[in-house]
Amino acid sequence: MQVWKVWSGAAVVTVALGLSIMLGACASSEGGAAPTPRVGPSPSAGGGGSSPSRAVEGGEIQVTIKNNTFPDEIRVKAGAKVVFVVTNRGDETHSFEFPDLGVYKEIDSGKTARIEWTVPDKKGKWDMGCFLTDPPGVHDRMEGTLIIE
């Protein structure tokens, strides 16, 4: 009987650990924190991405948006020439915008837009996101921060 309790406790820990891993994977792929954008050369250029925590000094920045999901943060260097390659994986039209910096582009469901932009010499943090409101509910939590270094 004592052996059963020890095995039962180990089994509970094993099952709990397995459930934790599975739930973490589900949260990160569907409803968890917004993905960090992949930065660096585009996949078609054959290059790999650089660290998302470093400021991008130029080139393409791959961004995927979808219903209720938007990158938490994008870092760019002041004066850099960048191209945002924004893919809308949602089932509604979404916008990609930095309201205080004059960037605004609506992207239809399933489409990709290329937005060429020279980063202004305005170091700091700026709001970015999809600020559309119709239809209700699909644009919630679609905000992040653009950081210009």
Image (cartoon, helix red, strand yellow):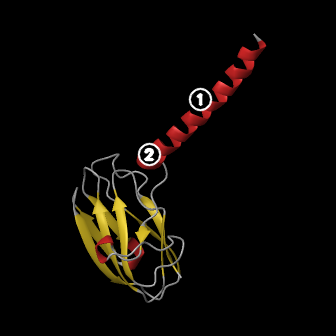
Image quarter of the N terminus? top right
Q: Percent from the top left, x then y, of residue 91?
A: 25, 49
Residue in view at x 71 percent, y 15 percent: 4
The label on residue 31 is 2
Residue in view at x 35 percent, y 45 percent: 137
Q: Quick one: label 2 or label 1, which is nearer the N terminus?
A: 1
Q: Nearer the viewer, mark 2 or mark 1?
A: 1
Q: Is residue 30 above or below residue 65?
A: above
In the picture, measured across the screen, residue 105 lies left or right of residue 37, that is left
Q: Amino acid at mark 1?
A: Val
How much space separates mark 2 and mark 1, taking CA atoms? Answer: 23 Å
Residue in view at x 44 percent, y 89 percent: 79
Q: Percent from the top left, x then y, of residue 118?
A: 37, 86
- Circles 2 and 1: CB distance less than 8 Å? no
Tell me how many marks there are.
2
Q: Is residue 147 above or below residue 1?
A: below
Q: Is residue 98 above or below residue 87?
A: below
Residue farthest along the front direction in this orientation: 3
Secondary structure type for disc 1: helix
Secondary structure type for disc 2: helix
The residue pinned by badge 1 equals 15
Q: Amino acid at mark 2?
A: Gly
User: How many C-alpha atoms fall within 10 Å of the one at disc 2: few (<14), some, or many (≥20)?
Assistant: few
Quarter assignment of residue 109? bottom left
